[in-house]
Image: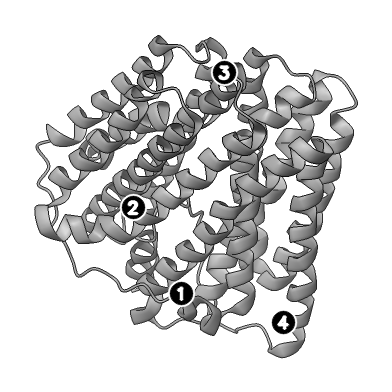
Amino acid sequence: MSLLISFAALFASVFLLQLGLGSVVPLDALSGTELGFTAEQIGAMGSTHFLGFFIGCWWAPRLMGTVGHSRAFAAFAAAGTIGILAHMMWVDPWAWAIMRMSSGLAVAGCYTIIEAWLQSKVTNQTRGRAMGVYRVVDVTGNLGAQVMIAFLTPAAYVSYNLLALFMCAALFPLLLSTSEAPSPGPAPRLRPKLAWDKSPLGAVGVVVSGITGAAFRMVGPLYGLAVGLEANRIALFLSAYVLGGAFAQFPIGWLADKFDRRRVLIWISVGSILGCGAMVAGAQGNIVTIFLAAGFFGFTTFPIYSISTAHAHDFAEQHERVELSAAQMFLYAVGAIASPVIASALISGFGPASMFVFIALAHVLLIVFGLFRMQARPAPEARTPYVYTPRTSFLIGRLIRRRDD
């Protein structure tokens, strides 16, 4: 209990950040539709979000080393708040795309700092409990952000102002905490080739995860509207997707630790293709079938990133883990930056089902490449434990390394 109390400020900041930043994505999609933005313009906002996300992953460790954890957190949170507040002051799709860069920057920067703070305070005896609570708070905040969409009016100043208030509130728990901020460590280098050198399949897996997650998170609200969901139902639609992903972590993690991870990755990709089919078929039914399809799609696609990273770390030395995680995040961002633009263009040109054809093709590629890699080398005898990776920063690699030590 004392452990949870000591981290209460960090967890409160995580929850408030999720409410503020997690709601921007669907609200922008709905607001853009209300304001007459094209699907391609809304997709571009999703791409610039991940461009800012990548910059934040790269910049946050360096800024922490320069000004410290608390000041760096305040700077990133302020950047996200400014981007949110500016929306209704300058209503233009390309201006919003720039504003979304600031939200992506804030997501990566704030979470990098929080994870760095956590990993510096936990021990081998407390790490499991601390990270378990962290994941629960993160998922709960994510669900709360999706549910809030049902109560926010699209393209309204008060909606964006409310999200900005959550961002401002997120500053108080961490900045006023009596817990001493950790000393910054050396910043990792960014070596994208390291991910391919250690595990080509893991590298392709995180790219496919970026393609899948970014397409659904950034363009999913457009899909929901296109298949006939009312704006207030989009929140439940996105919540079903997140819940499905949350429920997948334990059973898929158990399988990934017990069996050859390449086989698990291939079979979960088969499930992802079935999930794409379920989304297309569910759109022809009632609202219940659409929600169930979204939950199944989340169940089959969320674990792809964590399985891919775990498989790559099986081949890494202890001193390589941090830089390997950085390289994997870079590849995830590559897939995530391109995906929303492609998905939105497909929906605009060929209808809502085309987005899931695009995602399914990415998973077909992953299956084929996985089968090829199984012939290239045997599975490693020693494996690192499966760890649910929230895809917020590459500093999660330090947690894996310290736990293994």
Q: Which residue does the numbered mark 3 point to in the structure image? A: 35
Label 3 sits on what residue type? Leu
Nearer to us in this view, 95 or 1: 95
Closer to the eye: label 4 or 3:
3
* The N terminus lies in quadrant: top left
Q: Which residue does the numbered mark 1 point to in the structure image? A: 192
Mark 3 to mark 1 CA distance (whole Å): 39 Å
User: Do the residues under discs 4 and 3 have CB atoms within 8 angstroms?
Assistant: no
Residue 376, quarter of picture: bottom right
Label 2 sits on what residue type? Gly
- Tell me which numbered mark, 2 or 4, is placed earlier along the sequence: 2
Closer to the eye: label 3 or 1:
3
Give the image location of residue 35, x and y in percent.
57, 18
Q: Which residue does the numbered mark 4 point to in the structure image? A: 373
Mark 2 to mark 3 CA distance (whole Å): 29 Å
Q: Residue at x 44, y 22 (%)?
A: 91
Q: Which residue does the numbered mark 2 point to in the structure image? A: 56
Nearer to us in this view, 324 or 38: 38
Left or right: residue 269 compared with residue 317: right
Asked which secondary structure carries label 1, the reply is: helix
Q: Residue at x 72, y 26 (%)?
A: 224
Mark 4 to mark 3 CA distance (whole Å): 47 Å
Closer to the eye: label 1 or 4:
1
- Tell me which numbered mark, 3 or 1, is placed earlier along the sequence: 3
- Tell me which numbered mark, 1 or 4, is placed earlier along the sequence: 1
Q: Residue at x 75, y 36 (%)?
A: 348
Q: Is residue 122 visible?
A: no
Give the image location of residue 149, x and y in percent.
54, 18
Left or right: residue 188 compared with residue 243: left
Closer to the eye: label 2 or 4:
2
Residue 67 against residue 347 in the figure, above or below = below
